[in-house]
Amino acid sequence: MSSNQASLNLNQAKFALPTNDDLEQQQQQATTTLEIESDEDTFDYSKRSQWLRAAVLGANDGLVSTASIMMGVGAVKHDIKAMILSGFAGLVAGACSMAIGEFVSVYSQLDIEVAQRKREKERGQRRVRDPEEDTNEEKESLPNPLQAAAASALAFSVGAMVPLLAASFIREYKVRLGVIVAAVTFALVVFGWLGAVLGKAPVLRSALRVLFGGWMAMAITFGLTKLIGSSAL
């Protein structure tokens, strides 16, 4: 008798149907898993564009512009002091220009977004929520002009330091030019690779585009300055 009861209990345990609570719990777990996977798949990498543009592209601008200035001066003057001073002047002027330009640009974007949100509130298109929570989220999502300007100036300065440091300790003229070109080439590849990785873009294409662009800027500046310097002007 006990053997039959044990067999019956075992069969009931094997073929017991899940309850409604079990089904709801499984559905919630499946829904949560799908939401997490969907969030990972649909992550918008364009949200990184603000600080990415101010950092990586700012460093690339500082690198190319300062190196081009130093190459241009080096085309007509072999003195190391002239190259270093011209590069430093390019660093300061470029950092200030980038910071001011970024501040004005982001501030204009801020004004546009604030005006747009005011219009949406007036039309009643926004959901009714806790005013304090809504205000905090709005402030966090709005662009920050000062932060963008500081990041742009700092990134430009970091990029500009590469050719300056490369040329600071080389007395021989031809060797100095070669070291500048080599250091700038390496930095261009790194910046191109970093921008592609952070932006989820093709790495090789991005790195080559940045590299050839920097080479062209330095070559054009060197050639035109050499041409003008050797003429009667």
Image (cartoon, rainbow, N blue to C red):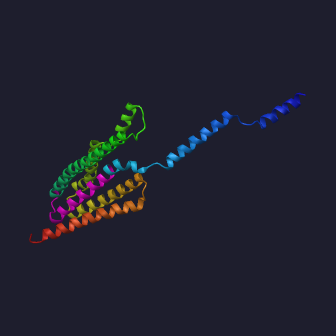
Residue furthest to the left: 232
Task: Say which residue appears at 50% left-offset and 46% top-offset.
Answer: 39
At 29% from the left edge and 58% from the top edge, which residue is drawn? 184
Which residue is farthest right? 1
Q: Main secondary structure of the magenta part?
A: helix
Is residue 3 toward the left or the right of residue 130 in the image?
Answer: right
The x, y position of residue 53, in whole percent, is 33, 51
- Total marks shown come to 0
Q: Looking at this view, is 106 or 233 the one in front? A: 106
Residue 96 on image: x %, y %: 20, 49
User: Where, quadrant-wise, is the C terminus in this rendering?
Assistant: bottom left
Q: Based on the picture, tell me whether residue 64 belongs to the magenta stretch.
A: yes
| On screen, residue 193 above or below 123 | below
**Quarter of the rendering containing residue 110:** top left
Viewer-nearest residue: 94 or 114: 114
Furthest-top residue in this view: 2
Q: Position of residue 127 (x, y in %)?
A: 43, 38
Q: Nearer the viewer, residue 25 or 196?
A: 25
Tell me which residue sits at (26%, 49%) in the image: 105
- The boundaries of the magenta stretch are 55-80
Q: Which residue is outermost to the bottom?
A: 231
Residue 223's place in the image compared with 110, above or below, is below
Quarter containing the N terminus: top right
> Residue 149: image x %, image y %?
26, 45
**Is 125 inside the magenta-drawn segment?**
no
